[in-house]
Amino acid sequence: MGISKHDAVSLAQVRARFSELVQEVKAGAEKIITRDGEPYVAIIDAERLDHYRRLARERIHLLLIDEAGKGLDDVAAGCVTSARGTIRSIKRRRSR
């Protein structure tokens, strides 16, 4: 979902229409505040921000679970080395 012209508001407009913009956001809109014509910050409903944060945490958890699964697959396939073995290997390469 991209930013539409309808969602973009200049910083000067925000100063003049803040209460109105907040009401629009509370009704479901998201507003991108621009500075010098470039996206700068956004105004979104607090509940939606909380939702976005929960989604981000869930995504991180899913990525961690996926990585743990890959690690378990490596262990099952025997594609692992001990920490000591890895350190010895690194030291050998550095000494060359």
Image: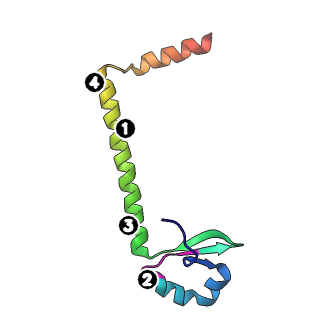
* Highlighted magenta segment, given as a residue range: 25-32
Kindly state the secondary structure of the residue where label 2 is placed. Answer: helix
Residue 59 in percent (x, y) is at 38, 52
- Closer to us: 40 or 6: 6
Q: Quadrant of residue 58?
A: bottom left
How far apart are the two marked residues, 3 and 1, measured between alpha carbons? 24 Å
Residue 9 in percent (x, y) is at 61, 79
Kindly state the secondary structure of the residue where label 4 is placed. Answer: helix
Which kind of residue does numbered mark 1 sit on? Glu
Tell me whether circle 1 and circle 2 mark residues in contact (CB < 8 Å). Answer: no
- Which coloring applies here? rainbow
Name the residue located 69 percent from the left edge and 72 percent from the top edge.
37
Name the residue located 39 percent from the left edge and 55 percent from the top edge.
57
Dot 3: within a 10 Å radius of its alpha carbon, few (fewer than 14), some, or many (20 or more) residues? few
Q: Earlier in the sequence, mark 1 or mark 4?
A: 1
Q: Which residue is mark 1?
A: 67
Q: Earlier in the sequence, mark 3 or mark 1?
A: 3
Query: Which numbered tag is attached to residue 51?
Result: 3
Q: Earlier in the sequence, mark 2 or mark 3?
A: 2
Kindly state the secondary structure of the residue where label 1 is placed. Answer: helix
Q: Is residue 88 above or below residue 73?
A: above
Tell me whether circle 1 and circle 4 mark residues in contact (CB < 8 Å). Answer: no
How far apart are the two marked residues, 2 and 4, measured between alpha carbons? 52 Å
How far apart are the two marked residues, 2 and 3, measured between alpha carbons? 15 Å
